[in-house]
Amino acid sequence: MSGTRALWLAVAAGAGLGLAYSLSPMTVLCLPLLAALAVWAGRGLSARERRWFVSLVTVGVVARLVVIAVLFVTADSDRPFATLFGDEEFFKLRSVWIRNVGLAVPVSRADFIYAFDEVGQSSYLYLLALLQAMVGPIPYGVHVMNATVYLAGVLIVYRYVRPAFGEVAALGGLALLLFFPTLFVWSISALKEPSYTLVAVAELWCCLYLVRGRRWWQRGVAAVGLVTCIFALESLRRGGLSVGVAGSLGGLALGIISSRPRLAWATLAASPLLAMVLLLPPVQDRALSVVRSSAVYHGGHIVSSGYSYKILDGRYYHDGRLLWAMDGREAGQYVVRSLVSYVTEPVPWRAESAALRAYLPEQMLWYVLLAFVPFGLVAGLRRDPLLTSLLASHAGALIVMVALTSGNIGTLIRHRGLALPYLAWLAALGICVVVGWLTQPSRSREGVHAYGDR
């Protein structure tokens, strides 16, 4: 009798799984992978820490699935699918057209031209097309896939931040990345930010193993993976190659220097020579060319739809051709103003719409997090110089790239989120250090910096 019951249970489970797969194949494929990754990331935790970890991850997953379900249920029957943002339609339609071309399904000439148009081309489109060729159209499954991809990236970082920064800081960074409002929304969108985050995490992992691999073949695999990930970043978003190279080389160099006091002093002594190199005319000409090109991108954002901010002299917005003749003094001012605007925009007193005013609470949270990053950076360099340096250098490279090329407030907010998977851990560690300092001021400096381990 028990054998018959087991058979019927297996049949029922198979039928249920088949029904679920027919309704949403990506959900059936993604959730087991996410569960396995969560089990791996939670290994070795204490009972109390595991309860917090499981609670945060469970709430984060369920909340995302609920929003995706609401999106599906509330979809307009007059449209092929619902979207959270207008840009999502771009990815959903173009990936379907590319898939149809690959499967020899007839498409209109206009759709064929638009599918392979150079504007907006990225490897993410072909990834979606490949998945849809395998499992069929996924207008809502792509949201589940991106939620899984984003959560996978966060859990991987948590796994190697936890031993370095301690349980409290790691859980704090995890909570920030799971529930920071804009990151929450981007993580369930059909946009390419989740995929970029996962590849960036893989690239960071390869940087660590390039130094910490115990065997030569591990370091060799890490080197190949690092190069692959850097080119993958470029294929997802223009500028990813520069961010990957600058973040990797800068982080590895800073990590090695900061962990060796003698080398750090030697580097400090040699800094005047580096300053002299930066003063060479070819170097300055190249830097000026990069700034001018970035200012052109900024000018393009100003004339795009939505709300924008200006940081150049007014004459440059009237005639963009003047940007190519910008002198060094104005270029320097542009760089400084760009970095300031990256941090401060949208400023509260210039919130021009109800949407921007609704965003202001998160903007205040953004200011608070940035204020704690320096404390986390100092504490992190004492705990794990290499990991901290890699987090800081990758965040810095992204900040510079986004700051110099932005001008549209909505786009700035969206792209600013690319740096948060690096900054959140430093901010969480900084909060731990400052709270420990304020609550127990008589403790020794070492005790304060050990606060995050308890």
Image (tube, grey):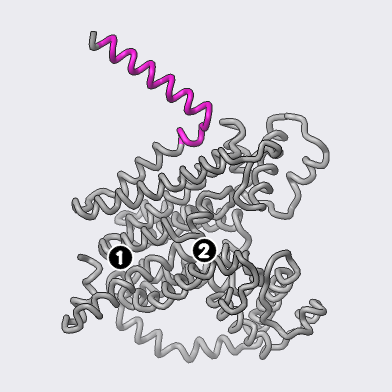
Within-10-Å neighbours for mark 1: few <14, some 14–19, many 20+:
many
| Residue 140 visible in the displayed image | yes
Within-10-Å neighbours for mark 2: few <14, some 14–19, many 20+:
many
Nearer to me, 204 or 405 = 405
Tell me which corner region of the image, top left, top right, bottom left or bottom right, holds residue 415: bottom right
Residue beneath disc 1: 169
Q: Main secondary structure of the magenta part?
A: helix
Residue at the (32%, 72%) spot, across then down: 431
Nearer to me, 59 or 210 = 59
Q: Magenta part of the protein: which range?
A: 3-29
Q: Which secondary structure, mark 1?
A: helix
User: What amino acid is at disc 2?
Assistant: Gly
Q: Is residue 187 left or right of residue 76?
A: left
The quarter of the rendered structure image containing the C terminus is bottom left
Q: Is residue 110 left or right of residue 164?
A: right
- Residue 432 picture location, percent across and down: 29, 71
Residue at the (17%, 82%) spot, across then down: 444
Residue 181's place in the image compared with 74, above or below, is below
First reached walking from the N terminus: tag 2 or tag 1: 1
Residue beneath disc 2: 417
Residue 17 in magenta stretch:
yes
